[in-house]
């Protein structure tokens, strides 16, 4: 038994980088993107090769295994370990040199692929292999797995693009493997030269043969390339510290031919015939994986075939030649880069979207990347489908059809003993099927634990024994990543799901997409780590806290891992009371970006609210939960007592403001927003009665922010909605007797005053975001009571604040899943732009004719969608695009003590630069109160709601 304290002390003394044997670090690294889970002793983040050597020395002395880890997106379990995990992403993540003339780059193992591509692009170069995880996978991980990606038909695997490596063996020897036996450990050459016949005949000739060790790379006719032989060894032979890579010329222009076929068999059979046209990609996928709104040619399956050229005309000509050669149902050629990126995202997200079947049941990796000769792909897929049917399983193949490599997630039952037994039987039979077609058990992601046990079926016992001898030469003590590739753990042990509770956990939200099971909701995270991207493009949001801190625990995946371990109860042992989970969730902005940007729809904002609800049950909460969670109550009191002016005056006195912020848990550097002198509903009551129109009736939602802090937004919305011919009312503030009319916050009959209950509608957002779910339910039920006469009509509710609209659309029905009125209310919610588009389709907005800048509200992006807003802006002559990301204030988040630094970092990522770089005459649009406050407090800029922009234009036209 290893003494963890002694090990930690020895590592800290020897290593200059971080050493963490704490609960959080261990919980974050129990899993990769596979079905497997192993609990490590701790994590070391080495600063350089000397640190790696020092860590290996300490682990060798203590008999502790070591596993190198990059982005942690491996599919076969090879990035998990029971000893010390070496995390190269923190420090050893640099591009050391790039030589455009030689076409080479020298990298450290923790460098993310996209960072290399960005550095190479100005020189017209790129690294050829590009897995779909290119935005977060590391070069070290790619070398360890011999990764490929969609362009391997043109540029090969990672092994094809590696020149030399720098490695350290488990016994501390520093070697520089390369061709001509360079860097070979003692005994390797003699071993190989005694097995030449086996090496020349025992390895399938495939473009995607990743399984086993690439010992055949050591043949004389293969230049005895030791570096190449290490590619795909999954960290079991040596630890990589540096790599010299080959870069390839990148086509100046690309054209994407999307070829449609009736079914996947037709697409698979056609793929090999396109290779003579020298395409850059031949990727295949079927309709099961394609969103209904995808802009694809009609068909049941598609090939994405890319052609390159020096000019757009040359690239298009190449793509059109491919279309003419293909026997297709329909086809599309796309040269616009933005549209190409949108189409490619469908394919890249498949590794996540494939984890949910069309009926929302779960599907898992395990047979993620078998490869067969491309000419056999059609036959193999038919046999594969038959085997699935025989076992009563479902899965949708997709992937690298041009290389004969197929990815698939299968709806294995990995939660019960019979299901796991069927998983084993299917795995054994599928391995035999792949071998019968001349294939490789792994065509990209490696063997790990998922397939290593079955390697004798592919190679035979004697070749597998040779692999063990190779392992013995490199790592005689079996220190590096034991249980992977050779002497493997059984494929049906150590499954990540085994420690999870078998009965549903008692929770507050309904989790309708997960059959009410919180464990199933947490299981959604499969580890592909889209949330670990360090930059966002377009309107994407996820995950702003990770981009601000760069820490795994502040990514959506990291938080999901901690929740998983909380449910498992082995590493995180104090359940809902866990301080480790609380601290990781503390910097979650509840932006809901993961709800849309995560390919499997993880909704960390909801999970955070759920956790806080349980964590603080019966206990005192942080001051900010009372100060800002109950904001609707405090602001209503100020309005009723007409003390807004006094509150503003006190807030302007620095000592008083400082004391109030300290008592309220508010960051000292934040200014307290000013309360409106006249709330929106008071203005509504005193304004002249609008002329009765004939247009549809809309009920305008007076959210807390519009009511008390930005009534100008409400007034502007009334101006625009009425100009569009709509009749505007406000929700009732008294619950009328049955059969009463729709209220407008004006009527007060004597009888209703005596018998009705007074109140104001509220979406409950501030209570939800602080995890005060019992209070949120009570507020929402009161709201539903008030709205009963509204719900009895067909009048929609127009909600101006995006976060409130999102709460009503999603949180309300999920929190009140037992009240059908909540779902009815959610179906009535319209955004400002949706209301104008649906209810006043013939209305033309005033011409603003100016550029627009700002940021799409994160909840708008994640829950509501912004297509109507884009169309409304275009109709008004507002040109340009809004930025993505999150403003960083995110309701109460940026005001809370301890969050100010992250809040500012989020604002500086997209929002503030977009405003600074905008033309002088640009209109700054910010529909959320938080976004406007952040702009004003950090950028000195006044942002306006789209309603305010249009209302001003109407007044100028009048």
Image (spheres, helix red, strand yellow):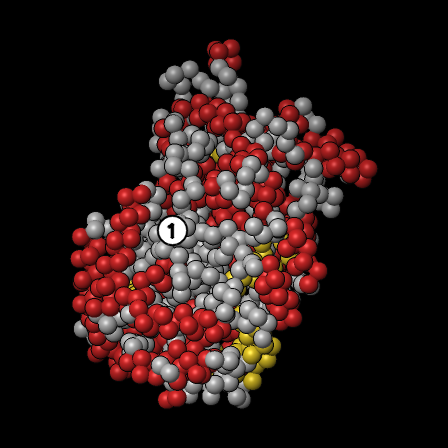
> What residue appears at the point 53 percent right and 19 percent down from the top-left corner?
758
Q: Nearer the viewer, residue 673 or 110?
A: 110
Residue 320 seen anywhere in this rendered image of the structure: no
Tell me if residue 496 comes above or below residue 690 in the rendering.
below
Q: In the drawing, does residue 638 fall left or right of residue 782?
A: right
Per the image, label 1 sits on a secondary structure element best described as loop
> What residue appears at the point 47 percent right and 40 percent down from the top-left corner?
567
Q: Nearer the viewer, residue 922 or 310?
A: 310
Residue 72 seen anywhere in this rendered image of the structure: yes
Residue 139: % across, % down: 50, 70
- Count of marks overlaid on the render: 1
Residue most toward the right?
655
Q: Nearer the viewer, residue 344 or 925?
A: 344
> What residue appears at the point 37 percent right and 83 percent down from the top-left corner?
194
- The residue labelled by disc 1 is 493
Q: In the drawing, does residue 94 fall left or right of residue 655?
A: left
Residue 414: % across, % down: 34, 47
Q: Nearer the viewer, residue 233 or 869?
A: 233
Residue 890: % across, % down: 58, 45
Tell me if residue 36 comes above or below residue 74 in the rendering.
above
Q: Residues within 10 Å of mark 1 (few under 14, many from 20)?
A: some
> What residue appears at the point 28 percent right and 48 percent down from the top-left corner?
421
Residue 243: % across, % down: 53, 77
Tell me if residue 226 comes above or below residue 837 in the rendering.
below
């Amino acid at each position: 038994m290893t003494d963890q304290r002694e090990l930690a002390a020895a590592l800290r003394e020897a290593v200059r980088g971080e050493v963490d044997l704490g609960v959080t670090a261990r919980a974050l690294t129990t899993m990769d993107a596979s079905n497997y889970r192993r609990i490590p002793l701790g994590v070391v983040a080495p600063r350089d090769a000397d640190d790696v050597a020092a860590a290996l020395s300490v682990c060798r002395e203590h008999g502790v295994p070591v596993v190198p880890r990059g982005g942690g997106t491996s599919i076969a379990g090879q990035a998990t370990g029971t000893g010390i995990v070496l995390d190269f992403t923190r420090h050893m993540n640099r591009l050391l040199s790039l030589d455009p003339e030689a076409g080479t780059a020298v990298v450290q193992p923790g460098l993310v692929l996209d960072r290399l591509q960005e550095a190479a692009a100005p020189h017209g170069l790129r690294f050829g292999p590009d897995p779909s995880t290119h935005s977060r996978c590391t070069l070290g991980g790619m070398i360890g797995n011999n990764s490929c990606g969609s362009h391997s038909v043109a540029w090969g695997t990672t092994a094809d693009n590696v020149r030399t490596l720098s490695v350290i063996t488990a016994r501390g020897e520093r070697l520089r493997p390369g061709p001509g036996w360079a860097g070979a450990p003692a005994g390797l050459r003699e071993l190989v030269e005694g097995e030449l016949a086996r090496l020349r005949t025992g390895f399938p000739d495939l473009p995607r043969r990743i399984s086993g060790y690439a010992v055949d790379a050591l043949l004389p006719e293969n230049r005895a390339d030791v570096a190449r032989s290490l590619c795909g060894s999954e960290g079991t032979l040596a630890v990589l510290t540096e790599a010299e890579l080959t870069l390839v010329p990148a086509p100046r222009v690309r054209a994407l031919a999307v070829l449609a076929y009736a079914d996947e068999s037709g697409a698979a059979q056609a793929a090999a015939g396109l290779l003579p046209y020298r395409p850059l990609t031949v990727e295949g996928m079927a309709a099961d994986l394609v969103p209904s709104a995808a802009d694809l040619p009609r068909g049941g399956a598609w090939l994405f075939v890319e052609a390159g050229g020096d000019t757009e005309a040359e690239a298009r000509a190449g793509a059109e030649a491919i279309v003419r050669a293909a026997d297709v149902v329909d086809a599309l050629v796309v040269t616009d880069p933005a549209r190409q990126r949108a189409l490619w995202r469908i394919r890249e997200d498949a590794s996540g979207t494939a984890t949910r079947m069309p009926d929302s049941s779960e599907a898992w990796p395990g047979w993620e990347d078998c490869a067969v000769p491309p000419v056999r792909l059609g036959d193999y897929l038919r046999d594969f489908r038959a085997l699935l049917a025989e076992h009563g399983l479902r899965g949708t193949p997709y992937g690298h059809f041009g290389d004969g490599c197929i990815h698939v997630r299968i709806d294995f039952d990995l939660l019960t003993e019979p299901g796991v037994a069927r998983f084993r039987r299917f795995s054994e039979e599928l391995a035999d099927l792949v071998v019968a077609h001349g294939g490789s058990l792994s065509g990209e992601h490696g063997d790990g634990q998922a397939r290593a046990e079955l390697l004798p079926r592919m190679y035979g016992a004697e070749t597998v024994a040779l692999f063990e001898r190779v392992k013995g030469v490199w790592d005689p003590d079996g220190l590096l990543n034991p249980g992977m590739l050779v002497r493997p753990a059984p494929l049906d042990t150590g499954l990540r799901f085994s420690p999870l509770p078998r009965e549903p956990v008692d929770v507050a939200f309904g989790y309708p997409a997960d059959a009410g099971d919180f464990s199933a909701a947490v299981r959604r995270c499969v580890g592909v780590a889209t949330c670990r991207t360090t930059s966002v493009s377009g309107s994407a949001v996820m995950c702003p806290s990770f981009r601000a801190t760069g820490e795994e625990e502040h990514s959506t995946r990291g938080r999901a891992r901690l929740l998983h371990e909380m449910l498992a109860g082995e590493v995180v042992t104090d359940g809902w009371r866990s301080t480790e989970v609380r601290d990781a969730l503390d910097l979650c902005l509840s932006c809901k970006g993961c709800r849309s940007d995560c390919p499997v729809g993880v909704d960390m904002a909801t999970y955070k609210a759920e956790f806080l609800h349980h964590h603080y049950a019966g206990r005192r909460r942080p001051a900010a939960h009372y100060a800002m969670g109950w904001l609707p109550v405090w602001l209503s009191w100020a309005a009723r007592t007409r003390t807004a002016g006094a509150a503003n005056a006190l807030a302007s006195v620095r000592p008083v403001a400082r004391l109030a912020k300290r008592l309220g848990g508010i960051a000292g550097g934040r200014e307290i927003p000013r309360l409106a002198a006249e709330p929106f509903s008071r203005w509504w009551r005193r304004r002249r009665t609008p002329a009765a129109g004939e247009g549809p009736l809309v009920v305008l939602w007076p959210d807390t922010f519009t009511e008390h802090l930005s009534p100008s937004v409400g007034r502007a919305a009334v101006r625009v909605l009425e100009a569009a011919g709509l009749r505007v009312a406000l929700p009732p503030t008294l619950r009328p007797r049955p059969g009463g009319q729709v209220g407008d916050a004006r009527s007060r009959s004597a009888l209703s005053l005596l018998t009705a209950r007074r109140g104001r509608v509220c979406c409950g957002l501030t209570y939800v975001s602080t995890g005060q779910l019992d209070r949120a339910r009570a507020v929402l039920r009161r709201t539903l009571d008030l709205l009963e006469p509204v719900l009895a009509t067909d009048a929609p509710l127009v909600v101006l604040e995006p976060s409130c609209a999102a709460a009503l659309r999603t949180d309300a029905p999920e929190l009140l899943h037992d009240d059908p009125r909540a779902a009815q209310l959610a179906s009535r919610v319209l955004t400002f732009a949706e209301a104008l588009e649906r209810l006043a389709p013939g209305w033309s907005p005033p011409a603003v004719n100016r550029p627009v800048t700002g940021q799409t509200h994160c909840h708008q992006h994640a829950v509501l969608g912004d297509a109507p807003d884009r169309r409304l802006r275009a109709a008004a002559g507002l040109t340009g695009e809004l930025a993505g990301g999150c403003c960083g204030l995110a309701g109460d988040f940026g005001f809370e003590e301890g969050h100010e630094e992250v809040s500012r970092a989020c604002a500086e990522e997209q929002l503030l630069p977009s405003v600074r770089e905008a033309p002088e005459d640009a209109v700054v649009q910010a529909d959320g109160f938080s976004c406007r406050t952040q702009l004003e407090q950090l950028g000195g800029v006044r942002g306006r709601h789209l309603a305010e922009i249009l209302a001003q234009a109407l007044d100028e036209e009048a």
